[in-house]
Image (spheres, coloured by chain):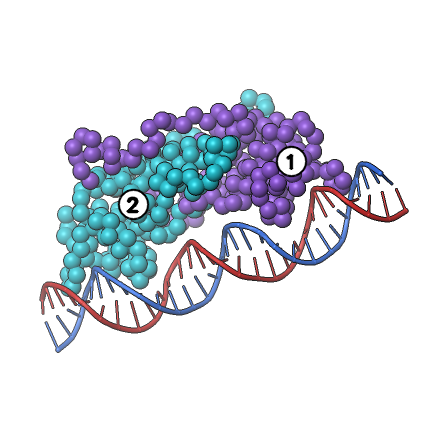
Chain colours: A cyan, B purple, C blue, D red
Amino acid sequence: MKISTRGRYALRMMVELAKKQGDGYVSLTEIAEIQNISKKYLEQIIPLLSHASFLTTTRGFRGGYRLSKSPSEYCVGDILRVTEGSISPVSCADVDNPCECEKCGVCKTYPLWRKLTQIITDYLDSVTLDDLVKGRIELDSVEDVRPEERRSEDGRQI
Amino acid sequence: MKISTRGRYALRMMVELAKKQGDGYVSLTEIAEIQNISKKYLEQIIPLLSHASFLTTTRGFRGGYRLSKSPSEYCVGDILRVTEGSISPVSCADVDNPCECEKCGVCKTYPLWRKLTQIITDYLDSVTLDDLVKGRIELDSVEDVRPEERRSEDGRQI
DNA sequence: AAAATACCTACTACATTACTAAGTATTTCA
DNA sequence: TGAAATACTTAGTAATGTAGTAGGTATTTT
């Protein structure tokens, strides 16, 4: 259950462009160097973002890319949907491609996958590029405590 | 970003065993038939659950598997960790394997992945096998509304 | 005209996935 | 006691996906 480099690199490119918002066009060479990613590989990924109208481009000398909108108008979910194809960790629970399995009605795990998809989607759609650039992601401080440890505190061993 | 059949089939086996909890040992043949999954493939997956001490087994005629504990004592997160290896959608954000990338401190996307991992982990660790069998997963009714539509309601187009 | 850029298509090595095949070890039951 | 049914183990394999690389064309500025 991993997000591929396609989606992760795309997001890093978008963040880079968000940082340089207002500085005119930024070339792929520049993005690749700053982010330390193969330019050739980024050349394959960036059309996914351009074709989704996320970027405005100019070709030729001094050409490059810039965001079509302001960073606060892009949510992470949209960027990942365009590059990863789907955000749902289980295809039958994808909102866009309704379940083709005829056993959804009796499947005991289907509601779990559906709910999980919902939670992931809600979160990724709530975060914008601007949030990332401004560092507005608040982490819980006790995130490292796993349920086993929490449970053993009240004496019950699993 | 997909959970593989390994994790999904493992969960379905565990659900099946939870349903039949108290009926003695259940054979793989039976599980494979009910769940309509290749028995040969399940033979590969089930040792992951046995070796984690999730199951008690007996060999030979009339042998099979049963849960070692009561269904309410297994959380989905544990089952997926054992079969999928890690729950985090981005390896650098895995709680168990701390980030080996030296740029975590300046990476603008790291907090996002960390928070996403946290949200997924918290949810999957909060659901037990018993919840699944009893159908205790409550879905939001408006889950199909995507942010684009929500936004366009107040007149702003993206 | 040269250089720098975006844009496009094809190829490739590697890893993973989702199995299948072919056995061995153990236990029950007729 | 032997046959059948089971768990358990190891190896193989076809298809797919991942993460790139290679080599070009089209466009624009200096």
Q: At numbered mark 2, what does the secondary structure look like: helix, strand or loop?
A: helix
Mark 1: secondary structure:
strand
The residue under label 1 is: B55
Q: Looking at numbered disc 1 in the image, what kind of residue is underneath it?
A: Leu
Are the residues tagged 2 and 1 within 8 Å (C-beta)? no
Q: Residue at x 54, y 37 (%)?
A: B11
Number of marks present in the image shown: 2
The percent coordinates of residue A49 (x first, y second) are 26, 51
The image shows residue B18 at horizontal and vertical percentages of 60, 30
Position in image of residue B78 (x %, y %): 54, 35
Q: Nearer the viewer, residue C13 or B38?
A: B38
A35 left or right of B11? left
Residue A32 vs A111, above or below: the answer is below
Dot 2 amino acid type: Ile
> Where does the C terminus of chain B fall, quadrant-wise?
top left
The reply to whether residue A146 is in sight is no
The crowding category of the residue bearing disc 1, from other C-alpha atoms within 10 Å (few below 14, some 14 to 19, many at least 20), is some
- Residue A99 in sight from this viewpoint: yes
- Residue depicted at 62% across the width and 40% down the height: B33
Among the 4 quarters of the image, the one containing residue A41: bottom left
| Residue under pointer 2 | A79
Judge if badges 2 and 1 mark residues of a common chain: no
Q: Toward the viewer: D21 or C10?
A: C10
In the image, B28: left or right of A34?
Answer: right
